[in-house]
Amino acid sequence: MKKKLNLAPVFFVGPHLILFLVFVVIPTIYGIYASFTQWNLAGSPNWVGFSNYSTILFDTTSTFHTQFFNGLKNTLLFVLFTVPPLIVLPLMIAVALSHKKLKGKTFIQSVLYVPGLISISASALIFTLIFNKQLGITGNVFGSTIAWATHQPYAWITIILLTIWGGIGGNMIIYRASISGVSEELYESAELDGAGPIRKFFSITLPSINFPLIYTFVMTTAGAFNVFGQPLMMTDGGPQQSTSVLMMYIRQLAFGSGESIAGMASAMAVLLGLVILVISALQYYVMNRNAN
Amino acid sequence: MMSNQVMNLDKSAVAVGRKRTKVSVSQVVAYVFLGLLCLIWIVPVIFGITTSFRSQTEVVSAGFRLLPVNWIMDNYTAILENTSTAPILRWLTNSVVIATSHTLLVVVVISLTGYGYARMKFRGRNVLFFTLLGISFFPGVVNLIPSYKIIDALGWVNTSWAMIIPGLAGMGNIFLVRQFMLGIPKDLDESAKVDGASDFRIYFSIMLPLIKPVLIVCALFSFTGSWNDFLWPVIVYTDVDKMPVTAGLLLLQDIYGNYRMIGQLMGSAILAIIPTLALFLFAQKYFVQSINLNSGIKG
């Protein structure tokens, strides 16, 4: 219709588009490309085909193979231990907070939300002290004589508790908003039918907040796969690398003190990315199908 | 000691309940459950704060105490005096500069871009938007190493730019702003357009005031997100004077660590917490409002 080219959209959308290209598209493509190369981060990458992948996946004599599978195992353990509580606990809190006669809801919500605003490095310092054998709470109050950070399963427990403590806030708020959006009439008519609290939860609340449940489950899981700070600060991957997660190996290989092995690290990153994609898709598919 | 407090709290919750004429079981259960959780959740924070006011001898000899015997400020003076190995004021300043500039730029970028994708007409608009959104779901771990390389090529390693700019490329906030704008009646800007107003004028005088709620929420989360970012600063900063406080705290484990200077360690952690906590106290309702935006994705 117009003959003159309208440049206004370029002004509005253009700057972000450039940022997106430079900081998302190009590095993602380059990251995939780099996974097929030998690269020390400083020079230019040498194409080696699938060699990095075959080393990581099949060469049982290689340390990269051991590191990848140990890191993947530990990352999966972290996901399995933290995601269910990060869904169930906020859900229970939201249900408890939806109780009509409850007082002090805002205060309770704030107390439970605030740890999420504390950086991992700050909260880990506090938790390290809490689990300190001589000076902390576990030793002095509960009489534990174990150095938690250097013994299993305690090392995992410290990491998991820190994660749950700092991680429930976001989901709690999402569930609260979703539950408050459920129609009162549904509950009232269920009460008339003689349904108790548990029955009401399973037959009204849960189905009504189906979408937020899927959303938080997928997002929380994907986030958990990127775990890095908690084990780094609490256990430094120990004891005997039993809490070394994949992100720690990726960082160490690419940015560690020795010669950078960025190609191998990129291959591990791509494999981790694929795991996240597949799991997210599976979760979405299964939960969506069950819901319908 | 803690178990005693827990029991007291349980009893008081029940006692409060009994005073009322009618108390349902579910109410008591809710109170006990939430009371216990709040107690567990708040103890680490209080423990961290009070320990930062205890002397090292007291920490070591008296073991765990929630409250100090003697409140001292020595830890904080010591932290502030150490400007060589752990310049915490420098780190806090860096964090303030980074988080504030990042947040301001986020607000500019997401409002402009959101307007573009929600209100302007150009060919391939929705295709472009949903393509970018789809790409943004791709796991970020893949672009981590090349992102460092790009920052390096731009000469931004060990500068604040490394943390201010890359995050502006995100799609999440733009999605929220666009959703919010789609809910605003079109008549407003269309009649302005008939009157000859330019897109920039409509964006600035009509849209910006209307989308303030969503911008505030995005700004708060950008600020806290930037303040608490950990992996990226650990990678891009090697210069002690240039790093933000989250990365600095990692160094402290070696400097004050091994529990030789616990008070200092806790004091530093507390100083790093204060800004985001203060922000929460002032803007609590917006933090909690965010949820409505999240569930708004439903529609």
Image (spheres, helix red, strand yellow):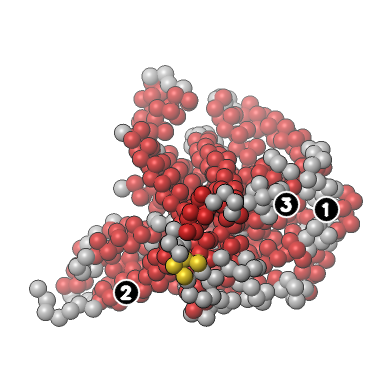
Q: Chain of mark 3?
A: A
Residue B79's x, y, as percent? Answer: 77, 69
Label 1, label 3: how far apart the Cα atoms are = 19 Å
Q: Is residue A207 above or below residue B215?
A: above
Per the image, the residue denoted by label 3 is A128
Q: Which mark is residue A14?
A: 2
Residue B119's x, y, as percent? Answer: 25, 66
Question: Quick one: which residue is furthest to the top in this view?
Answer: A194
Asked if residue A252 can be seen in this view, the reply is yes
**Mark 2–mark 3 CB contact (< 8 Å):** no
| Residue drawn at the location 69% of the way across and 61% of the way down | B269
Label 1, label 2: how far apart the Cα atoms are = 57 Å
Per the image, the residue denoted by label 1 is B68
Disc 2 residue type? Gly
Q: Which mark is residue B208?
A: none
Q: Nearer the viewer, residue B8 or A235?
A: A235
Q: Nearer the viewer, residue A198 or A146?
A: A146
Quarter holding residue B278: bottom right
| Residue drawn at the location 61% of the way across and 72% of the way down | B237
Quarter holding residue B22: top right
Near mark 1 (Cα within 10 A), the count class, few <14, some 14-19 or many ≥20, is some
Residue A3's x, y, as percent? Answer: 11, 79
Residue B149's x, y, as percent? Answer: 50, 73
